Amino acid sequence: MTAEGSTSEWEGLTRLDFTFKGRECILIQPATRSVKSDGGKMVMYMEYFGAFPNTAISLVEHGYHLSYIKNGNRWGTDDDQHLRREFVDFLAEAYGLSRRFVTIGMSAGGVTSVNFAHLYPDYVSVLYLDAPAMNLLSAPLGYNKPARNEETVKEVLDALGLTASEMLSFRGHPMDKMGTLAEHDIPVVLVYGDSDTSVPYEENGKLLADFYEQHGKQDIIAVFGKEGGGHHPHGLSDPKPIVDFILNHDR
């Protein structure tokens, strides 16, 4: 049984909006379906559906289905990840899609991407991480910054159920889960701006790039830095290098 909902147009593509277990969901199917032995390929926005969409659009043009399920919060809590796994199972059964999918994890979406891959590594084919927050003490909590967004800090603490002092000993950051990614040989394409002050690369994405290099995973990670680039815009002006990596490493 397929999902029932409303259809509209998104970037020249047909968009289906529906609900799954009370959550808002989106599915965009390619004009021509690409089917492998394990089912149709899928890419999922882990947060901020539709943001900086040139990579997502290119993947749909290459036969990928594009999906999204709304999170309860932006900070990758386990309840959201367990429901996401059920959502993927539903799409597999209803539409014949592969349970292994590509993530689009921009900023806080990087938290969700890594946390999901840690819990369900067999469900992830490639992680596309764009200015990902790997260390919550750095971003968004900004403990090393003279000014920070207190509203966002409260949002994180409330989502995790922790106090500010408890965060100092918290060991559930995405950076604490990098071992799972490497152990399961999950390919990563990483994009960053070298002038990003919201999610500084040296304190976040670089931790993952260095970890993969130190553990002999150089062949399954590609890093694209943007000279003078800030936190926005995400992606590359020409998404081809990102898309090529995904196409070459999608298992």
Image (spheres, rainbow, N blue to C red):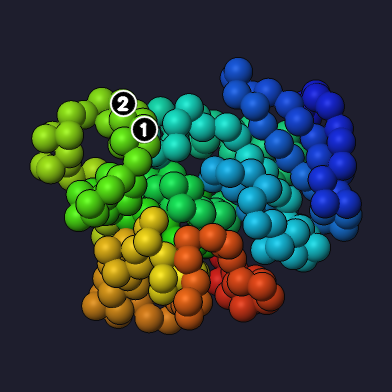
Looking at the picture, how far across and down is residue 149, in whole percent?
A: 35, 41
User: Residue 75: x, y in percent?
Assistant: 39, 38
Of residue 152 and residue 242, the one placed in the foreground of this image is 152
What residue is shown with label 2? 158
As shown in the figure, which amino acid type bears the numbered disc 1?
Glu
Q: Is residue 106 above or below residue 7?
A: below
Q: Are marks 2 and 1 in contact (CB under 8 Å)?
A: no
Dot 2 or dot 1, earlier in sequence: 1
Q: Residue furthest front?
A: 146
The percent position of residue 175, horizontal first and vertical second, equals 27, 56
- Visible in this render: residue 173? no
Specify the label residue 151 is tagged with: 1
- The C terminus lies in which quarter of the figure? bottom right
Q: Does the image show residue 55? A: yes
From the viewer's side, name the closer residue of 23 and 52.
Answer: 52
Q: Position of residue 239 (x, y in %)?
A: 66, 72
| Image vertical order of residue 204 relative to residue 91, above or below | below
- SS class of the residue under badge 2? helix
Residue at the extreme top: 22
